[in-house]
Amino acid sequence: MGKKIKITINGETVEIVKGTSILEAANQAGVIIPTLCYHKDLCVAGNCRVCVVEIAGQKRLAPACATPCDEGMDVLTNTLKVRNSRKHIIELLLSEHNADCTNCYKNGGCELQKLASEYKIMNQDFIHLVPFRNYTIDMFSPSIIKDDSKCIRCQRCVRTCAELQGVNALTMSYKGEHAKITTFFEKAMNDVVCTNCGQCINHCPTGALVEKNYIEEVWSAISDKTKYVVVQTAPAVRVGLGEELGFEPGARVTGKMVAALKRLGFDAVMDTDFTADLTIMEEGTELLTRLKGALVDKNPDIKLPMATSCSPGWIKFIEHMYPSLLDHLSSCKSPQQMFGALVKTYYAKARNIDPEKIVSVSIMPCTAKKFEAARPEMHDSGYRDVDYVLTTRELAIMIKQAGIDFMKLKDAHYDRLMGESTGAGVIFGATGGVMEAALRTAYELVTGRDVPFENLKILPVRGMEGVKEASIKIENPLEKWSFLDGVELNCAIAHGLVNAKKVMDSIVAGTSHYHFIEFMACPGGCLGGGGQPIPTNPEIRARRTEAIYAEDEGMPMRKSHLNPEITKIYKDFLIAPLGDRRINKINTKYTPRKRY
Amino acid sequence: MSTNYQLKRADFIFKDENDWEEVLKNNINRPPNELINELISSELKGRGGAGFPTGLKWKISAEEVNDVKYVICNADEGEPGTFKDREILSKVPFKVLTAIAICGHVIGAKIGFIYLRGEYFFLQPELNKAINEFEYYCREIKFDFSIKIFMGSGAYICGEETALFESMEGKRGEPRNKPPFPSAFGYMGKPTVINNVETLAHTYTIFKYGSKRFYDLGVQYSRGSKLFSVSGDTPKPGIYELELGMSLADFVDEFGDDDTKAVQVGGASGFLVPRKRFSETNIGFQGKLVGISLPTGGSMMLFNSSRSMFNVLDNYLNFFAEESCGQCTPCRVGCQQLLRGIKAVKRGEKNAQYLDKMLKLAETMQFTAKCGLGQSVANSFSSIVENFREEMIY
């Protein structure tokens, strides 16, 4: 802890640690200072200037977010000068902003709109600048819509893309009146290194960056009586959705969500957690096979470490940034795409439905899933495997549109066949979850015993550290796996692409000795995904994480291989993990891409 | 007009003195503290415009504990109407190089940079030759110091010290938040002294002749001489070294064309002084002019009665709207609003009272903009609109 100092804010003395920003000190003192460019996930920019405050004795105002407190500082946050300046700044931002609020997807969720409302900006008569620009909306990406006319140049997206993701698809270019956020050579978002992770959307204060929504398409499908609409819900949705519908962060709303989906009119409500369990069976087997190939057969073509392939943001990232290392990726499709392929084959056959009539919808905490579902190779069922991907936010919009009082819903259960899951499936939603789920199953498969952690909680892989490492020593394996006796299985977990980059660079440099690595594109894993409720910040993500692990502990089964529907699908359809019929159904290939 | 005062010319900066080797050798053998005290007692203030006491600046950096420190000569001379640094670098480069090296000795830096304005690329070959000769001599006397030129790319904002660092670091030229200040966290995050070309040239004078010679020039709070870039409606445009503290009336008597309507002191980011205020305006850091230090040292633009002050302001605002880095709201949007605002008033699309709203906006920009650029737009805007309001409207 640093040295304590005293300052006064609006006359009240506050004791804070030296170096604390005025904004933080004010928060501690219960004084609210408006912000726009500030975000807890990001470095301080201090460029919107809406947080300016008066410091006694100084003529100029100081940005509260970027000014550290000094001993004895006398801060005033509510003087005429401060209010007038803030009002001016909000008016200026509105004058360059396409403030056609009722026409905006972010209507009601826009931070600028909220400030304009608080400060009652009503007779704004600055010259409206938008008509002088030639703004075009970039709608080329299947995931993200970028509308510069709504941009306030706070650069939160730029900092997100650089600091959290290390992708730098978005950057500030030009200067002065022409300054704007652009991609490389102002290409469309689908034509640059963008991974579609959607973190820029989660951090955008206005409607300049939003997801491409497919709400109307899904409503049409539901109302089409000739269609059989199947929906799957990703693990992280159940711990985020509540935030959009009146619950505090960290509320677990699985049962209510299922009930709401049924009320919306979906014909079958099933769970991506089921294919998460399936992923563990497939990916776990693939890992053990690779280990055998490398350790016993000494096959030089076997690539280790093996990397997970569940996160489509991560997949596009490695395709762009490390195209020569694609062989390290597990060949397993992501749970969403496994589900999509199976719903139009296995499920259609079992339920005797013409797959052509099935519309497959997924609810994801993710915008990259929209891109993933649209990939040309994702048509292994003979149809597009997943027809529409909705984010958690879009589902909340549909629930509100349908007039469902979410709070009052009674819990409902997922439908059978692909609706059963285990605690291992649900923790896919948190960073380290895939690793933990894989270890629970793989360790037991190899040794016949539970992983040596109390109550199956593999704590070293949990938590919010950017890169986590864990090693498990395999002792006394079953005879089939005797080659693994004494092997120390080295694992790493990275979340946020900037951390993925660190791990990948260590692989390229040859300084790491991992066998298996879990990569998630978003901070905190899927629960911090680009399709999750806004706002996001470390505390909210921590609440969601707690909820995910609570969900796991509340499950009757917590190991993927115990899922009876998994046993059933292997018996009836897939034969065995890595069995023949899965080829072209639940595994895939990757596409090397350039950076520009 | 005053009659008993004459402009006091000075001749230090361009004085032909081929003794830089001696000055360098003598001064790098003096203890840093002594040199700092020499500077402090000279009361030299930064000649780039902001007027920060140079001795204090060096002192703070000298006290920072760090193995790596830098000296940077800010030669990104971009203020409209300023052209003195170019002359210094082409006529007396060794004075500047010597001053950079002495500063290095004082604060403990081994590397100096000259951040050269993009448009001054033609100075580069000669300057490099001078640097080679200078470094050769440094090696000869076993003084470990090197100087590199860093070429700017033509952005006005990169003359702002922290934007300059960003630019040198290969980033977008945007001002940083302050604190931390350059003296502790400058180029590459290291303690850095950054001085204007002219400031460094004056330190040469001070280190050579002692602080008293410098201190004896000028008036209280505004010691020493200063280069002025005189342009506009004047029969004798050019660069003149004058003692600080002169009255603007005397200046106009000397340089005006007998029809001077107003003088823009300090370039686009400075103030416009109308004729009726010439005699009460002094040129120096504590001039009578609204009690504010003149933002840029040196640019003196004279306008006669043939000039439309609306056009002058329109020109300045176009410049600012273009040259703002676009980072902070008050500057990026404010400049556009002021520019479009005066045009709208001129065209009758907004009524004359809109100018008052613009004046308030300019004040907000002064209070809230992130760096000197946005903060100083109000200087020219308010002084022109307030003094020539009817020219804005009719």
Image (cartoon, coloured by chain):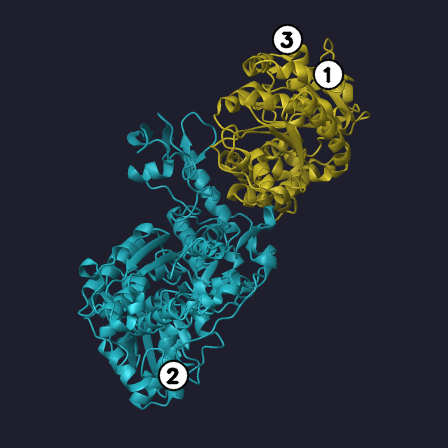
Chain colours: A cyan, B yellow
Disc ID at residue B77: none
Q: Are marks 1 and 3 on the same chain?
A: yes
Residue at 42% x, 41% y: name it.
A51
Q: Position of residue B106 (x, y in %)?
A: 57, 20
The C terminus of chain A, quarter of image? bottom right
Q: Amino acid at mark 2?
A: Asp
Q: Amino acid at mark 3?
A: Lys
Closer to us: A430 or A35: A430
Give the Cα distance between marks 1 and 3: 14 Å
Closer to us: B230 or A382: A382
Q: Position of residue B206 (x, y in %)?
A: 65, 14
Q: Amino acid at mark 1?
A: Phe
Give the Cα distance between marks 1 and 2: 90 Å
Q: Can residue A332 be seen in the rendering of this structure? A: yes
Q: Can residue A223 be seen in the rendering of this structure? A: no
Contact (Cβ within 8 Å) of mark 1 with mark 3: no
Asked which secondary structure carries label 1, the reply is loop
Does B223 sit left or right of A513 as displayed?
right
Asked which secondary structure carries label 2, the reply is helix
Disc ID at residue B212: 3
Per the image, the residue denoted by label 2 is A580
Disc ID at residue B12: 1
Q: Position of residue A573 (x, y in %)?
A: 32, 85
